[in-house]
Image (cartoon, rainbow, N blue to C red):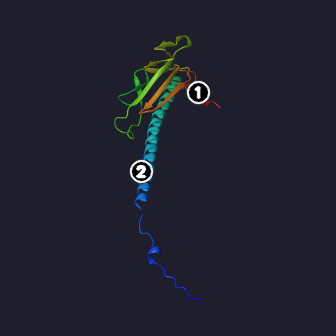
Amino acid sequence: MGKRLMVFDESAFRQRSGFTLIELMLTLALIALLSSIFVWNINALLKQGELEALQNEMWSAVEKAKQSAVFTRTPHRIRFDDEQQAFMVSAGGEEVPFKVDTSGMGEGVEIEVVFKVVLPRDGYRLVRGELVTHREIESVTFYPDGTCTPFSVDLKIAEYESVYQIDPWTGSQLTRPEEEG
């Protein structure tokens, strides 16, 4: 038997020292996709945080008006001042502002607050084929007996919006039927 001599080609075992063009393009496309999803989600979270700041100031103003009306035995009103970007709680001639922190919001971000009174069942109106159950009002009144005007409030920052229906007997948020346990 003869010995067989095997010759190895070094170039066949040499390791690659880079990536192919396809690999680079796929990696860049994946990074671009993930970063766009991340930026979109961060933007949405920031806007929701801004809406929460608006909601917190609204609830602070509601609590202040309710408590002050009961303790001072005088009606208190809440309105939203667009110029000051604040909920204004007033009794007599004195107004206490509950200013919305807009420092973290971008320039030109519009805050929209609309108080609406709930029309009585026999007060519904048909407007352009749509049943209207609420009418916009300038302010809401809290009375010394702890009740308030039956109202709802629409809070909106950019495209994010929340609507709260307020119980006139307690001044707290009413839950929607689908939210109840």
Residue 154 vertical position relative to residue 121 in the rendered view, above or below: below
Could you tell me the amino acid type at mark 2?
Answer: Ala
Q: Is residue 8 visible?
A: yes
Gap in Å between the C-alphas at discs 1 and 2?
A: 41 Å
Instruction: Report the residue at 41% width, 62% height from top.
Output: 20
- Residue 88 location, quadrant: top left
Q: Is residue 75 visible?
A: no
Disc number lying in front (1 or 2): 2
Instruction: Report the residue at 39% width, 37% height from top.
Output: 102
Instruction: Report the residue at 49% width, 13% height from top.
Output: 126
Q: Position of residue 69 (x, y in %)?
A: 51, 23
Residue furthest out toward the top: 122
Q: Quadrant of the C terminus?
A: top right
Could you tell me the amino acid type at mark 1?
Answer: Arg
Q: Residue under label 1, please give it.
A: 176
Q: Position of residue 5 (x, y in %)?
A: 52, 85
61 vs 153, nearest the viewer: 153
Disc 1 packing (10 Å; few <14; some 14–19; many ≥20): few
Q: Position of residue 71 (x, y in %)?
A: 52, 25
Residue 117 is labelled as none
156 vs 87, nearest the viewer: 156
Residue furthest out toward the front: 1
Q: Secondary structure at mark 2?
A: helix
Q: Quadrant of the N terminus?
A: bottom right
77 vs 122, nearest the viewer: 122
Q: Position of residue 12 (x, y in %)?
A: 46, 74
Residue 133 vertical position relative to residue 82 in the rendered view, above or below: above
Q: Residue under label 2, please give it.
A: 32
Q: Secondary structure at mark 1?
A: loop
Q: Of label 1 and label 2, which has the lower sequence position?
A: 2
Residue 116 vertical position relative to residue 181 in the rendered view, above or below: above
